[in-house]
Amino acid sequence: MDQLDNSRSKTRKVLIADDNRELRSLLGELLATFGHQVSCAENGQRALDMFLAPASQYDLVITDICMPVMSGIELIDHIRTYNREIRIIAITGYADMGMLDAVKHGCVELFYKPLNIPAFAEYIESI
């Protein structure tokens, strides 16, 4: 991670939805080091509530596929109802239907857990 150049970073408002507290924290801290404004939600419903809040205007959503209360796929469906253009990145620990569903629902990228953090950070900074 020290090798990544954050000088090319564009500040974004990012929403992270994942039921794993440690991963949410890790991703939040990583993105904050690049100057992004990060909000985190523990499930899809909380993320949707945050996304729909007045003046939220997120630039990027990062969501786990399998979460309690509302799955990442359901979250993506709801977000796409309101915003067809926002970039959504899906992350999953499963290599089967989650991948196909995420791609079908318009994610720009899919990453598998455990995350390769340097590759993930490099991708985020490249978009």
Image (cartoon, helix red, strand yellow):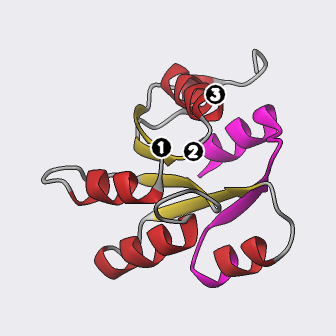
Badge 1: residue crowd in 10 Å (few <14, some 14–19, many ≥20): some
Residue that lies at the very extreme toward the front in this rendered image: 69
Seen from the viewer's position, the closer of residues 89 and 101 is 101
Residue 83 in the image, given as x and y percentages of width and height: 33, 73
* Kind of residue indicated by mark 2: Asp
Q: In this picture, which residue range is highlighted in magenta?
A: 103-127
Which quarter of the rendering shows the N terminus?
Answer: top right
* Kind of residue indicated by mark 1: Glu
Residue 108 in the image, given as x and y percentages of width and height: 62, 67
Q: Is mark 2 on a helix, strand or loop?
A: loop
Residue beneath the point at 50% across and 63% down: 87
| Residue bearing the label numbered 3 | 22
For residue 27, above or below residue 65: above
CA gap, disc 3 and disc 2: 9 Å
Residue beneath the point at 57% across and 80% down: 105
Residue beneath the point at 64% across and 84% down: 104
**In which quadrant of the rendered view does residue 7 lie?**
top right
| Residue bearing the label numbered 2 | 19
**In which quadrant of the rendered view does residue 68 lie?**
bottom right
Is the Cβ of the residue at disc 1 closer than 8 Å to that at disc 2?
yes
Image-based side of 95 in relation to 10, left or right: right
Badge 3: residue crowd in 10 Å (few <14, some 14–19, many ≥20): few
Can the viewer see residue 84 in this picture? no
Residue that lies at the very extreme toward the top in this rendered image: 2
Instruction: Tell me which label, 1 or 2, sits earlier in the chain.
Output: 2
Image-based side of 90 in relation to 112, left or right: left
Is the Cβ of the residue at disc 1 closer than 8 Å to that at disc 3?
no
Q: Point out which mark residue 42 bears.
A: 1
CA gap, disc 1 and disc 3: 11 Å
* Kind of residue indicated by mark 3: Glu
**In which quadrant of the rendered view does residue 49 lie?**
bottom left
Residue 28 in the image, given as x and y percentages of width and height: 52, 29
